[in-house]
Image (tube, rainbow, N blue to C red):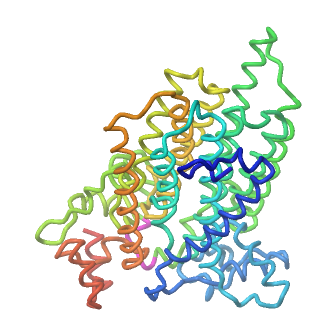
Amino acid sequence: MVFSLLPGRASAAKFGPHYGWGLLCLFWAAGVTYAALCMQPWLPIPIGHKLVFNEMMANLLQGRFDISPATIGAEAVSYNGRSYAYFGIFCAFLRLPLLLTGNNDVDITAASILIAAALSLACRLYTAALIINRLAASSVHPILRLAVIVAVLTNGESIQFLIPSVYQEVTSWGSALASLFVLLLVRIVLGFGKSGAAGYAALALVAGLALLCRVTFGLGAYCAIVAMLGVQLTRTGREEGQLRIPIRLWIPAASILALFAVLAMSINYARWGNPLTFVPVQHQEILERLYPDRAPRMEKYGALNIERVPFSLQYYFAPIWAVTDKDGRFLLQSQQVTLFDDVEFPPSSLILSDSLFFLLAAIGLRALIFRPQGIDRPQCARAALAGLMAPWLVMLMAISLTHRYRMEFYPALDFAAYIGLSDLVRRDKPFSKLGRLMLMILPTSAMAVAFVTLVTYGLLGSRPATDFNVKRGWIGLLEDRLAGRNVLETAPDFIRQRQK
């Protein structure tokens, strides 16, 4: 089925439906190789906290949730005399084979990220191929096939995050699970798969795993399912003249969602005594000593605050914050150091790194509002999209802005883009010259942005932008980094700068 994306005469129908999973595995393997080539092996990037999940797995089998301070380092959550990691337990279970074979001291962080990236890539390719194969009104123009495959393979979601770190591993697996969730979601709302109890149970299982990996991805998936079940509930009530709950539909999914939610809250309670807190920043004592301005900021603005939204919007979509004056101060530095613990390099824009998908998403929004007749379950699609956007609000209000948090925006963006793609391929109308030009320019320019962002991310790493000496601008900063010159401010100066 994935071959339906390729220009030319080959199509999935030619191979038969029983080849679908084989092709998925083929692209999964190709994705691992592809992602490995993008992992920047020429950059000596140290991986901090690299055995956190190894130790977490070993301790979980002993009924413990704590992590030794030497392993978790400054990220330690200190509670009742013990140290804990705030990461979910999903990535720890990926180390179970190591533990069973006596190789629990092996660092697989980079390999884990590559596998997650490849799984995400396979799901996204498969979803696009499914839409083109099932819905194309006529032979889809080769340029659209090529544009879609270039966008999926080489734009921001696939490229610009491939830097090994435990933080990135958690986010990459959350994104991979989200891509699988979106694939299952598209099958339901476009009428490709069953929308009964089995379909919702599959969505709930993936959502539960995402919750145990990274809570924000799980939050979006949970909200999407609940919103869809609400639509089903009200529609059933209207059709039958009374408000009757479709028990067969929601009981399996609700049971799975509740099971994972209880498990996640139980882990939180065992770690730091609060089932509803996933990142207890007030117990990160080492970080508070390193950054003495952190506690007053938390007390005044909290972990989430709507006042941060304007700055966060331009950080993710139009990064004017990275512009510096002649004294090396950022354009919005007063807001940056007042509202946020961390505003991280590199400057980038989701609109530029994933421009074709933003265009498709705009088409998808238009279809959901003005052309819903082309969507099998438009009400469910609208509800799911609203639910998937819940992480957007969290990220826009969060106390830290990091490069990897951009991945939280992709599930909703991808889902809307697939709705747009389904609307586009149904049109039995040739593309205009302008349309063909945009299909050539958008994914190729986004590819360039993604690769530049990847290299910049690898050079500067996960540090607050105010850690760096930017008197020559951030481009000068990159030149200094490549030349091997010191690019960091001294700790006392940095702390004084943040306290001003």
Coordinates of residue 250 in the picture (x, y in percent): 82, 34
Residue 378 quadrant: top right
Nearer-the-camera pick, 40 or 25: 25
Along the line of sight, which residue is nearer the eye, 123 or 490? 123
Spot the residue most to the top: 241
271 within the magenta span: no
| Left or right of 1 in this view: 469 | left
Residue at screen point 66% across, 82% down: 108
| Residue placed furthest toward the left | 326
Residue 313 location (% of width, % of height) = 36, 48
Find the magenta span and give its range. 289-295
Question: Residue pushed farthest right?
Answer: 248
Is 298 placed above or below 18 here? below
| Above or below: residue 477 compared with residue 330 | below
Q: Which is more toward the observer, 19 or 48?
A: 19
Q: Quadrant of the C terminus?
A: bottom left
Residue 313 horizontal side relative to residue 28, left or right: left
Give the residue drawn at x 81%, y 51%.
18
The residue shown at (61%, 89%) is 70
Residue 303 vs residue 324, the one in the foreground: 324
Q: How many marks?
A: 0
In the drawing, does residue 459 fall left or right of residue 222?
A: left
Residue at the image position 78 percent from the left and 47 percent from the top: 17
Residue 460 lies, in percent from the top left, at 37, 77
Q: Name the spot of residue 406 as percent of width and height, x first.
A: 47, 57
- Left or right: where does residue 140 sit relative to residue 190? left
